[in-house]
Image (cartoon, rainbow, N blue to C red):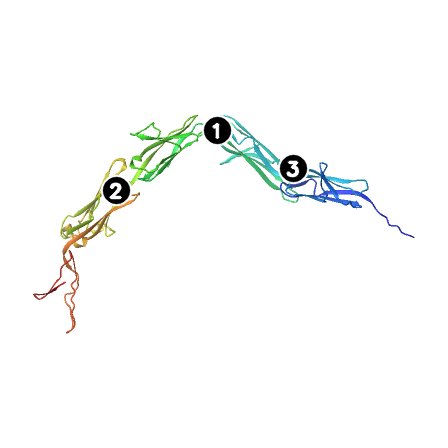
Amino acid sequence: MIGRSAHFIDYPRVEIGPENPLSVERDQTAKLECNIDAKPKPEQVKWTRNGRFISSHPTHTIHRVSLQDAGRYTCSADNGLGKIGEQEITLNVLYPPIVQIETKAKTAEEKETVHIKCNVTANPPPVTIEWLKEGDIDFRRNGDTLVLRDVRAEDAGTYICRGINMMKPYGGKTLEREGNASVALLVRHRPGQAVITPEKPVVHVGNSVSLMCKADPPGYPDPQYRWYRDVGGEMSTTVIAQGAQYLIPKAGLSSEGKYHCHASNELGNGGMASATLEIHQPPQFLAKLQSNMIKRAGEVDFFVTCSAKGKPEPSITWLKDDVEITPELHRYEVKTNVDKGPNGMVTVQSMLKFTGKARPNGNDLISTDRGQYTCLYENEVNKANSTMHLKIEHEPIVLHQYNKVANDIKETAEVLCKVQSYPKPEFLWHFGTTLLSTG
């Protein structure tokens, strides 16, 4: 027997994948697969879209898929047996919400009802469409249309429409995606009560100071700010400046006083604000110490004085050789007079009396009074001081502690005489009644 082999023939059967429809997120890569089962096997496959040939590769790859790539694709194969096999696959391009608002800004009158429409497109469709308000964590409205009834000035601001969808691309996890757009709501209203900052302005003489005026609510259209000042205890109607900021580049004592500001627009005037500017001055001497002075030991009732003015009131401290003079020394007495003048200026006059129970007779000058004396004035602005060098004339005071000197015979003997005095003393040496030398 002679055997004969059988030859099987088969029309093309087409399988597409990896799933149908195939869901891919926008800007990712899509791979459309076409598997052919046929005998004889066709030499190539044919991918078409809307009747237009696009590829002959079993796997059609689309990099960075866009919304325009979404739709139906057909894979076909022909092995010459007269019947073409084909299958269709749908590419589903997923994308997050695209949010559009009809306008970037909307103007409304007070007490008007406002409607703002938000258009949201997404694939899959959004699960949430909501409105938020910038700066207000408690504001939240659901739906694609924002409705605000009886609007007031405080309703003005930036509103945000947010859309959220859930997408599950092939081979991936479910993803939450969102998109948003914003609109500025402008409510026409007159300015409210103004406030000046700082509330209690204080500046040192010669320094600059800036006052800021702000209305609440601010007013729309944007308001003009005007500044006024008291003259003779009453507010003048003369405008001294315009704008939210009033700057005094170099303040003087004449700058002190009460300032006022308010905001106004075409809808009316806001409430007036007031603030009192206080000018502080560092201590300034009216009478200084004499820089050098010579007195004689035993003189009585000696005193020196200093006088200075400042704002706020300066303190006074007396020092001797840079050490504060205190009552515990019982050698000095300080008398201070304070005179409060106009505009808060204070004059402080102080007297340092060389008096105390530690002195001979209670008020005699002594040799140890010599030294440097300082009256120091100080307030929160600065310090100022005046210094005097006091010299005391007095008889020589013996300082050496011995009255005998012992030496061996033929040794050189040296006798030292140590004294203190002012003016400089003249030394005379005697042996018995005989004058030996000077110096």
Q: CA distance from mark 1 to mark 2?
A: 55 Å
Q: Say whether residue 77 is left or right of residue 382.
A: right
| Sooner in the amino-acid sequence: mark 1 or mark 2 | 1
Query: Relative to residue 437, is residue 7 depicted above or below?
Result: above
The residue that mark 1 highlights is: 187
Question: Can I make out residue 358 in this image?
Answer: no
Q: Is residue 12 left or right of residue 254?
A: right
Local secondary structure at mark 1: strand
Q: Which mark is residue 250?
A: none
**Which amino acid lies under the numbered mark 2 shown in the image of this protein?**
Gln
- Element on which disc 2 rests: strand
Rendered position, 358 above or below 118 = below
Looking at the rendered structure, the secondary structure element under dot 3 is helix
Q: CA distance from mark 2 to mark 3?
A: 83 Å
Q: Residue 193, percent across and down?
A: 40, 30
Mark 3 or mark 1: whose residue is earlier in sequence = 3
Left or right: 146, with 84 as reference point: left
Residue 395 lies, in percent from the top left, at 13, 56
Q: Which residue is mark 2?
A: 284
**Relative to 423, does residue 83 appear above or below in the rendering?**
above
Percent position (x, y) of residue 187? 48, 28
Q: Quadrant of residue 231?
A: top left
Inspect the image, locate mark 1, and give the three-letter code of the amino acid beneath it: Val
Identify the residue under disc 3.
68
The percent coordinates of residue 436 (x first, y second) are: 10, 66
Mark 2 Cα shell of 10 Å, populated few (<14), some (14-19), many (≥20): some
Q: Nearer the viewer, mark 1 or mark 2?
A: 2
**Can residue 383 be seen in this snapshot?**
yes
Please state which amino acid type lies under the numbered disc 3. Answer: Gln
Query: Are the two marked residues, 3 and 1, in contact with CB atoms closer than 8 angstroms?
Result: no
